[in-house]
Amino acid sequence: MAEYGLGEKPSTAGDAYSFGVMLLELFTGMSPTHESFTVELNLQRWVQLSFQENSVKVIDSELLQLGEALYHQGHHLSRKLQFDCLATVIEIGLACTASFPNERMNMRNALHKLKAAKNDLLKH
């Protein structure tokens, strides 16, 4: 639930939620206001359900296409490494958008996990 849109007071849990929605929007290519979403099926719920079935399904197809030619320091980044990194980002987005504020990943942990995913991707 988008707390700020419902008149809730700003909080770090609300900021984490907003950050998670932004990650999900960026990496799925889907807007949280897309016409296919309803009260029962929002962006977070769609990603959660789809990610369990087939994690590739939720990742923006343009990102997947770009990944075919990714290089770092002259070395091709394998599709598996790229996918693992993208999956971690999606998992962080989901953790930040947990329904209850006390269950959400905090921003410090989100940053730590994002940096770790980047380092894992680029160290190979």
Image (cartoon, rainbow, N blue to C red):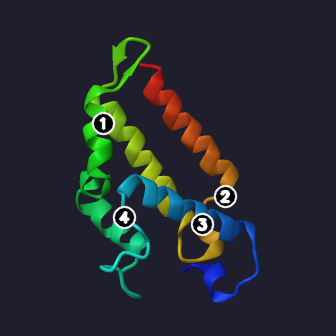
Read off the residue under disc 2: 106
Residue 102 pos. (x, y %): 66, 72
Tell me the quarter of the picture where residue 38 sits. Answer: bottom left
Q: CA distance from mark 1 to mark 2?
A: 30 Å
Residue displayed at 44% across by 72% down: 32
> Along the horizontal axis of the image, is 17 left or right of 121?
right
Residue type at numbered disc 1: Leu
The 10 Å Cα crowd at callout 2, few under 14, some 14 to 19, many 20 or more, is some
Question: 58 or 116: nearer the eye?
Answer: 58
Of tags 3 and 4, the one toward the viewer is 4
Mark 1 residue element: helix
Please give the label number shown on residue 18: 3
Tell me the quarter of the picture where residue 31 sits. Answer: bottom left
Read off the residue under disc 1: 66
Read off the residue under disc 4: 30
Circle nearer the N terminus (3, 2): 3
Residue type at numbered disc 4: Met
Of tags 1 and 2, the one toward the viewer is 1
Mark 3 residue element: helix
Q: CA distance from mark 3 to mark 4?
A: 15 Å
Of tags 2 and 4, the one toward the viewer is 4
From the image, which quarter does the N terminus lie in? bottom right
